[in-house]
């Protein structure tokens, strides 16, 4: 499936035989949306972004043919029903993107990776939102990088997406992460 929020990644694919495959796919889309500005500035492209669940518990990601495919472990080793922390997943994605440029884990690799992390952190600090909005705009947007839950306001309580579990603004008609339509 093409990634609407990151044209620099050709497709995303979750493990369909694992529980919560839709949430896993939404998580891949969310990761892709968050790294898009860094990828665009660095002219990085990925053919396919895929979930994998390797038997080696220490393996978090793999880059095949310098970005033809990037595979990321989304779920905890030994417990495939629980997802890893979002910031850790973004870190794995930045690590794997570095392999598009540098193969071995040498000083050049880590220097480039540090630059990707610096850019990603600057984007967050500047108020980047994956949907293109920024802090201080005409309307508030849920910060997808935060673990904080939106608070209820005069428009009603926030609602949780059934597909990706993101807590959304009360008046949002579709999920601000995976774009699933709000259940009635």
Image (cartoon, rainbow, N blue to C red):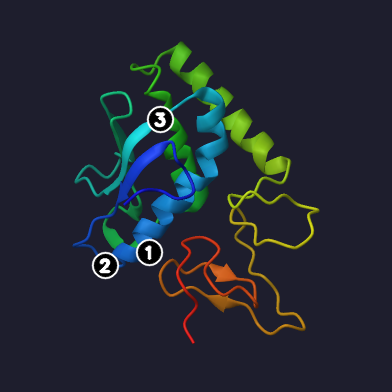
Q: Is 175 above or below relative to 7? A: below
Residue at 41% in and 13% down: 106
Q: Quadrant of residue 61?
A: top left
Mark 3 and mark 1 in contact? Answer it, CB < 8 Å: no
For marks 1 and 2, give the CA distance: 9 Å
Closer to the N terminus: mark 3 or mark 1?
1
Residue 145 vs residue 104, the one in the foreground: 145
Which class describes the residues within 10 Å of circle 1: few (<14), some (14-19), or many (20+)? some
Residue 17 vs residue 174, the one in the foreground: 174
Position in image of residue 15 (x %, y %) = 24, 56
Mark 1 and mark 2 in contact? Answer it, CB < 8 Å: no
For marks 3 and 2, give the CA distance: 29 Å
Position in image of residue 87 (x %, y %) = 52, 47
Which residue carries the number 2 mark? Answer: 19
Position in image of residue 157 (x %, y %) = 65, 82
> Circle 3 — which element?
loop
Q: Is 113 above or below relative to 1? A: above
Which class describes the residues within 10 Å of circle 3: few (<14), some (14-19), or many (20+)? many
Residue at 29% in and 39% down: 59
Position in image of residue 72 (x %, y %) = 33, 43
Q: Quadrant of residue 63?
A: top left
Left or right, 55 with respect to 97, comes to left
Residue 56 vs residue 53, the one in the foreground: 53
Residue at 26% in and 67% down: 19
Which residue carries the number 1 mark? Answer: 23
Which residue carries the number 3 mark? Answer: 45
> Circle 1 — which element?
helix
Q: On residue 97, which mark appears?
A: none
């Amino acid at each position: 499936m093409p990634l609407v929020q990151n044209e620099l990644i050709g497709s995303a694919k979750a493990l369909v035989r694992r529980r919560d495959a839709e949430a896993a796919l939404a998580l891949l889309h969310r990761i892709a949306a968050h790294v898009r500005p860094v990828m665009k500035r660095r002219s990085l492209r990925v053919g396919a972004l895929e979930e994998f669940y390797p038997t080696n518990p220490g393996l978090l990601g793999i880059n095949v043919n310098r970005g033809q495919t990037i595979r990321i472990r989304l779920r905890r080793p030994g417990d495939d029903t629980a997802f890893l922390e979002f910031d850790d997943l973004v870190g794995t994605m930045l690590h794997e993107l570095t392999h598009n440029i540098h193969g071995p884990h040498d000083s050049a690799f880590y220097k480039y990776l540090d630059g990707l992390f610096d850019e990603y952190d600057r984007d967050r600090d500047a108020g980047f939102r994956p949907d293109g909005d920024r802090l201080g705009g005409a309307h508030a947007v849920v910060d997808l990088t935060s673990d904080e839950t939106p608070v209820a306001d005069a428009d009603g309580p926030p609602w949780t997406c059934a597909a990706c579990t993101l807590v959304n603004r009360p008046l949002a008609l579709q999920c601000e992460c995976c774009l699933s339509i709000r259940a009635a």
